[in-house]
Every structure is written in structure tokens, then in C-alpha cells.
Image: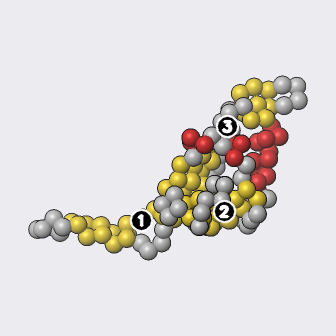
Amino acid sequence: MAFDGYLLKSGNDIFPHQYIQLASWSTTPNQREEIKAYRDDNTRDLTRVTAAGRKTAIQFKTRPHLHLAEKQAIQDFFVSHETDHDERKVPLTFWNDESNTYETGYFYRPNMQFTIERITEDDIIYAEFTFDLVEY
């Protein structure tokens, strides 16, 4: 499948690129996990038992100077698609740079930290913040 112009979406809703610092976009697709790995005592040959499942991690930073309404729009994108609010579990379709295809999986968002740059009488301006998305 060819690149279709987006990095991340849920359902039919594409995550707005204008909120992403594109140079901060980072993925670790199809991560391998070792169930067991050891070296033979004599030959020193390596034996690896690798789990069959492959999971992806996605990280990106928002652009700085987000207004409260923009931060809320970002939060609404994720919250409105969550299938479990307590777990922050959300189905996402993402561009997989290893396979050069789109793939879909369930991800969660760990706790987030928000930093305020300044406030006005009717707005809050935020510094960039980081999204970590971890596949189930």
C-alpha cells in the first residue's frame, strides 16, 4: 500500500499534522522481544528464543505554543476514540516505516505531563508535550 498522506488516524479521523513537530516523530515498529537468550558455555554460540508477536511504539512532540483550545482538540482526538478510558486504550492506524505500509493496532497513552508557558486573561499557552503510544 502506498503512503496515503497521514501518519496516524483512528477510525476515519486523521490526527492533524499541524500539531506535530514532524522532526520529533519517532517509531520503533515491529519490536522484537526475547523470551530467552543465552550463549553456549563452550562454543559461545548465541541462542535466541524470540516472541512471535511484534509490537510498535510511537513517540512525537506537539508543536510549542499550543493554545488551550488546540490542546483540548488533541485530547479530544484520543479520548473520543478510546475503547477503554481507564486504560486509555485506542485503536490507531499508523504508518509502519519497517514494512512501508499502514497497520492498525490498539495503543495506550501513558501518563502525560503538561507544561504551561504563560497564561492570559482568557487562555493558557502550553509548551510542547510528548506523546508516547505503546501497542498492546
> Could you tell me residue 58's position as x and y percent?
57, 54
Alpha-carbon distance for marks 1 and 3? 32 Å
Give the residue displayed 72% in from the left and 62% down from the top. 10
Q: Which residue is mark 1?
A: 33
C-beta proximity under 8 Å, tags 2 and 3: no
| Mark with earlier residue (2, 3) | 3
Query: In this picture, is 27 found above or below 32?
Result: above
Q: Label 2: which residue? A: 92
Q: Earlier in the sequence, mark 1 or mark 2?
A: 1
**Foreground residue among 2 and 110:** 2
Quadrant of the image containing the N terminus:
bottom right
C-alpha separation, residue under disc 2 versus residue under disc 3: 21 Å
Return the residue at label 3: 63
Depicted 82 relative to depicted 117: above or below: below
Q: Amino acid at mark 1?
A: Glu
* Label 3 secondary element: loop
Q: Residue furthest right?
A: 122
What amino acid is at disc 2? Leu
The answer to whether any part of residue 18 appears in the image is: yes
- Taking the view exactly as shown, the residue that stands out farthest to the bottom is 52
In primary-sequence order, the first of circles 1 and 3 is 1
Q: Is residue 8 above or below residue 24?
A: below
Q: Amino acid at mark 3?
A: Arg
Residue 87 location (% of width, % of height): 67, 61
Question: Whole-percent x and y of residue 25?
Answer: 57, 46
**Residue 14 is drawn in which quadrant?**
bottom right
Q: Nearer the viewer, residue 25 or 123?
A: 25
Residue at x 56% of width, y 64% of height = 101
